[in-house]
Amino acid sequence: MAIIQIKDTVKRYGSLLSVDHLNLDIREGEIFGLLGPNGAGKSTTINMLSGLLPIDKGDITVQGVSVASDPLKVKGMLGLVPQDLAIYEELTAIENVTFFARLYGLKGKLLQERVKEALAFVGLSDRSKDKPGSFSGGMKRRLNIACAITHRPKVIIMDEPTVGIDPQSRNHILESVKELNRLGSTIIYTTHYMEEVEAIGTRVGIIDKGRLIACGTKAELVERVSDEEKLVIDADGLTEEALGELELHPKVNKLLRTGSGLELYMGSSHAYLQDVLFILTKHNVKLQSITRVEPDLESLFLSLTGKTLRD
Amino acid sequence: MLAMIYYDLLQLFRSKQIWFTLFVLPIALIFILGSALANDFEGQNKDISSAKLSVYIGDNNPLTEALQAFLSDDSLPLKVSYAKNEAEVRSSLQSKRADFGILLPSGKEAASDSGSQLKLHTLLGKNAIQNIVAQTVLQQFVEGLNVHATIQSLEAAPLANGGQAMQAAAGSGTASEFSAATAAIDKPEAAEASEARSRMEHIVETSVTSNLGQFRAVEYYTAAMMVMFLMYSGMMAGVDLLKEKTNKTLYRIKAMPVPGSAILLAKVGSTLVITAIQVVVVLAVSRIFYDVTFGGQWLQVALLCLLISLFSIALSLLLSLLMSSSKSLQTAFHCIIVFMTFVSGGFVAGVGGVITDIAKYTPAYWAKDGMLELVLQGSYAGIGTHYLWLAVMALIVAAVLAGIYKKEGFR
């Protein structure tokens, strides 16, 4: 069942079409990874969903409530973790979390409990009375998350929450995301780090130039590029004849010459590995190593857009 | 909204700069300016030393005899020297050899100036206190003549007209050089003209700031500094909002179930709390240490402070919607405050002319003048005008702010 429905949504900035008739359903209880390069329209989509930007055309609903017609109600159901740190340097960690919790309407004993819970969740209980100025980048990121989860929102939107932090903090945040999901929140996670989405996302949407170009589970998406398997061959004595014959093989889609060998892009490479070895042996090529690389989301993105995510 | 106000205040009170700017600086400036410029205000409380008078008397002036007789009185606090011509009087004043000058033109010169009207010109020197001394003594002379003129009026009506005119002219005392019509001797029509002229001089519009002798320097600067620093406090609302924009907390708050208008109102609320504390502190310190009481009309003072604060808060929030950085807002606002404070006489008392005309378009003028009216126990009608102007100015800025916010939001 879709908790969020984005219906034929359009957003323009002057003549620039930032979101182009976007349609997307996000199911309750999933971690939905929204992938796309910079300027693809991810943040604009998030801002429209959060009620921060007016929608030019179409509609977005959260649990059936339209963002356009009742933005405050929708905002109460969401928890936004902004891409940039949005905390007060002059307030302590506990004051930061308490302040934002109060804006979500929490009061009294419940407020105190939830604040403690949120700080414990992100591992900052013992630093709760310190100001963020004394925190590392990763700790500030975790505080940034704590400020968005005290009211136990139905949907948590995390806009590139791991930008610019060390691997240890990144792992902590990714684990936190999975834990929040286990506790019942639907997560929308935007990033341009493919490996993060692959690690935590139950479904992935790939967005480019404001349009959704692919959507599904990782397995479903990878299946679409199953003929994009790659054989990385390191060999001596590669001749033009050998390369010509490999290129003529019906399952080889693309052949790239590298410094000490070649890369072969072909479908079902495991089934046709014998053919490749036969051709190389026939032309007296001395094989050093051969590696089979399975397609991933990066391959899919490359295949769909002709560019990498970080272009 | 209360949470936003509370946490705003928490952050503000943790800033040493805020403490210094809002509480220490105004009190220090009131003390420094009040002490340093006390001489310009408190002439009537000082020991009177003799004023050096430079007098030029032209030929055949009917007042020559009377003036010389008057000035020869040793009991007067005057040291009189007679100049050969008008230029010598002016030169003595310039070089401070004299404190005050009197010009009594020849009968011929006076007649060519204004028909048959005779004039007594006075020239102010550079020492405000000695000016007051000389003017006060000279007024005795003028009043003596009036008595004489009144007696003569029983015999000749034209002389009486001149006497009234002279009295009226002597009563104004706001110009640096004033003329006192002494007598209209020959022609009745000349006497009428003289009377009309005198009335005009008497009806010269005055503001409380031109009557510097009526309140103490510390009272004047308490009012001026209070207004200036309340405007600085108001600026914090806009600066704070822009800082929230810069550190992205505004973005986060806007994604929460909080109406945008509540964010603006919270900024107004927290700034008003700060200004209220500031007003109480400054008034208490100036009451306890400098005995500034504003005539005991504290509620009226509070209302003036509220209105100037609301104007300033609305203006700073308006600028925060139009500008992108808190530094540019601070620079612009600083220029506005300094300009308003200067033209309204907040730095240098007694500015007049065109500058005062310009000042009347600024809320700083009406707020400071209103407070000084309270010091002088001014009429309710007079002070009411100040409230009205301040309220109108604050409402205009607030209306523009509301219009831009409705159209553009926080941008």
Image: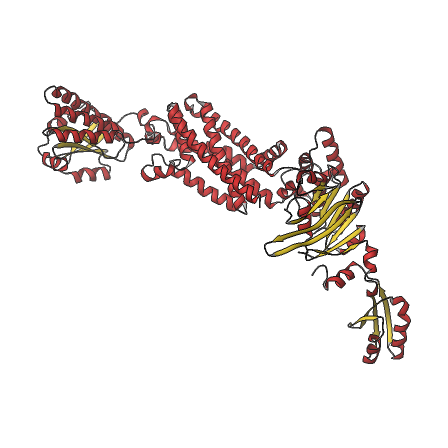
- Asked which quadrant contains residue A40, the reply is bottom right
Q: Give the colour scheme of this rendering.
A: secondary structure
* A291 w.r.t. A118: above or below: below
Please tell me how many numbered marks the rendered image carries.
0
Q: Position of residue A140 (x, y in %)?
A: 69, 44
Q: Position of residue B231 (x, y in %)?
A: 47, 36
- Asked which quadrant contains residue B40, the reply is top left
- Asked which quadrant contains residue A245, the reply is bottom right
Work out whether residue B344 or residue A189 is closer to the camera in this orientation and state it.
A189
B127 to the left or right of B106: right
Q: Quadrant of the N terminus of chain B?
A: top right
Q: Position of residue A176 (x, y in %)?
A: 78, 44
A262 to the left or right of B226: right
- Considering every residue shown, the one lying at the far left of the view is B60
A195 to the left or right of B61: right
* A5 w.r.t. B231: above or below: below
Q: Position of residue B286 (x, y in %)?
A: 45, 26
Residue B81: tell me if it is visible: yes
Work out whether residue B191 or residue B144 is closer to the camera in this orientation and state it.
B191
Work out whether residue A140 or residue A73 is closer to the camera in this orientation and state it.
A73
Residue placed at 64% from the left, 45% from the top?
A52
Residue A237: tell me if it is visible: no
